[in-house]
Amino acid sequence: MKRRRVLGILLLMSTFLFPYFFSVPYRFDQILIPIVVLYCLLIHKVDRTFFFLLMSLFTVCFVLPLFSTILHFSHTDFIGISNFIKESQNLLKPFFYSFFGYFLLNHFGVQEKQFHAAFKLLIVAAFLFSFTTLLAQVSTGTSRNEVNDFLVKYYHLHPFVSSTFRFPGILMQPATAGVYFAFMSTICLMFKYSPIYLVLVILEGLLSNTKVLWFSLPFFIFNFVINMKNPKNIAKFLLLFVILLSTFYVFFGNMLGQMFDFIFGVIKTDPFAGRLENFVAENIAIILGQYPFLGIGFSEFGPIASNYGTWDSLFYYELTFGGIFGLLIKSILLLLLFVYPFRDYNFRMKLSILVLFLNVYLAGIGTSTFYQERIGDLIFIFFGFYYALNSSKNILYRTVDSKISLEHY
């Protein structure tokens, strides 16, 4: 069991840390996790409600787009095998990674304390990647340096983000880092992580210089207020944040100034990055006008084909593959996936999860939030794990405002 538990933790961390090799567009963990899930489904019984929820997600994520593709096959073009594999892998994230989170407890035996220890390591790793990118650019005076090139090659960092004073590091692009901030800051607050981890999450968001961070700020403040009630912890957090931010200003003041000038200039001039009038808006209008109910599935045509794969909006993505019907049903199912595992927890935690869902969902105006590389995987793993944890017969959970405790029978 101990070896299996270690393997489970390594698999969990691989979804966030494993690099791309040999110019292949997929990571090894993206192939291994579905295989592990299918194996576990063969040998383990699964909670009926959870199984029904995820099979419903499978239907709306994959079967519905297939049906829509067949329905419109005569007057649209198939997207091709390569795009089909890529988009199928993306659409099935909620299905496979939620099941993987569930089996982390029920097959690998990973416990809650170990699960959160892995999350804390990932927070530190994400910050170190971003900070190293910043340090390399400041020391070399250019965004074209060995650290940046390494991340571009092995972690698919967007090749031009560093030149615009944005350092998402392992998270590939600023929008992904914004989703990371929304999710990880909520986890830090809900589960009473040491203030240093929350500070590192905020600094990661600031270094990534993303609009999603500023969009998420009201949601963060709300969750901060309802979760951080201990004056001592508030003081620790503020002290650490001020010290680290002041240190950054002393050593990287000029760079920070350029970063803030850039992002606030973008927010002021074009907060939606043209999404209200560019190809995203045009393609949404085409889908709503011609294929409103079921979308076009794994098909393309005309203007949609010319920008295929550039999913700059969650709503554009969902409308393309499932239309209004798919968007509405999947939204309901994802909301259930978020809130149902915490049905027996206190009001503070339930409210925090609801705020997190609204944050990530509404941020989908500007990016495909639930399908972002690495952090999207981690989000669904988290909720699958907590569904298993909450339905386990071996653990009694009691949550109170001051702490979270586990009592074993």
Image: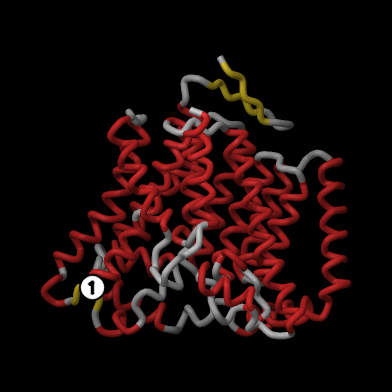
Q: Would you say 317 lies left or right of 240 here?
A: left
Q: Note whether residue 343 is visible.
A: no
Circle 1 SS class: loop
Quadrant occupied by the C terminus: top right
Q: Quadrant of residue 306?
A: bottom left
Name the residue type under label 1: Gly
Q: Nearer the viewer, residue 71 or 147?
A: 147
Q: Position of residue 166 (x, y in %)?
A: 65, 75
Q: Position of residue 351 (x, y in %)?
A: 59, 42
Q: Would you say 154 lies left or right of 404 here?
A: left
- State whether residue 49 is above or below residue 272: above
Q: Position of residue 271 (x, y in %)?
A: 59, 77
Residue shown at the point (34%, 36%) measured from the top left: 40
User: What residue is shown with label 1?
Assistant: 80
Q: How is the protein colored in the picture?
A: secondary structure
Q: Would you say 380 lies left or right of 209 here?
A: left
Q: Position of residue 295 (x, y in %)?
A: 26, 67
- State whether residue 194 is above or below residue 277: above
